[in-house]
Image (tube, rainbow, N blue to C red):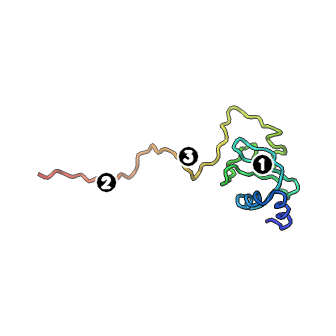
Amino acid sequence: MSYPTRTIKNFLKIGPKEYLRQLLYIGDTKFGNLVGTDKYGNKYYENKEEFFGRDRWVDYAEHYGDASQIPSQWHAWIHKIKEHPPTSDPPPSPKYLSPHTENFTGTRKAFRTYNTTAPKILAWEPKVNRRE
């Protein structure tokens, strides 16, 4: 829920174009400092004057925004597991970890297993004898 005073204050700070964009994509208006950008183009913001839980947010590069688009280092910062963002406190990157990918469930890139078992029910094929 957004209070009228907060909404008006954010409108004056961010301007009408950004105000309408945020209402369309986020559903709320927010104003804060840009903390960093990840390699996928997502932008991370912080405003310590906001309520707890609303003070850190992400502006997704692709506007259908899904939480699986956030890499694990930024996820830890967004959810206050880590106090400092990955831009100021870079995490170690072990060589055995695979690179981050978003969740592709419901898309063409979704994982589908290949079935190697024979079907239990076979379709009936009529056998026709030649007439003489």
- Dot 1 corresponds to which residue? 44
> Which residue, as the protein is rendered here, is positioned at the far right?
49
What is the spatial separation of the Cα atoms under label 3 and label 2, in whole angstroms?
32 Å
Q: Amino acid at mark 2?
A: Trp
Classify mark 1: residues with Cα within 10 Å, few (<14), some (14-19) or many (20+).
many
> Which residue, as the protein is rendered here, is positioned at the far top?
95
* Of marks 1 and 3, the one in the foreground: 1
* Mark 1 residue element: strand
Observer-nearest residue: 90 or 124? Answer: 90
How many marks overall?
Answer: 3
The residue under the point 78% across, 60% down is: 16
* Mark 2 residue element: loop
* Whole-percent x, y for residue 24 in the image: 71, 61
What is the spatial separation of the Cα atoms under label 1 and label 3, in whole angstroms?
29 Å
Classify mark 2: residues with Cα within 10 Å, few (<14), some (14-19) or many (20+).
few
Q: Decide if residue 47 is on the left or right side of residue 104.
A: right
Q: Earlier in the sequence, mark 3 or mark 2?
A: 3
- Dot 3 corresponds to which residue? 111
Observer-nearest residue: 69 or 113? Answer: 69
- Dot 2 corresponds to which residue? 124
Relative to 38, residue 106 above or below: below
Where residue 91 sits, quadrant-wise, is top right
Q: Earlier in the sequence, mark 1 or mark 2?
A: 1
> Which residue, as the protein is rendered here, is positioned at the far bottom?
4
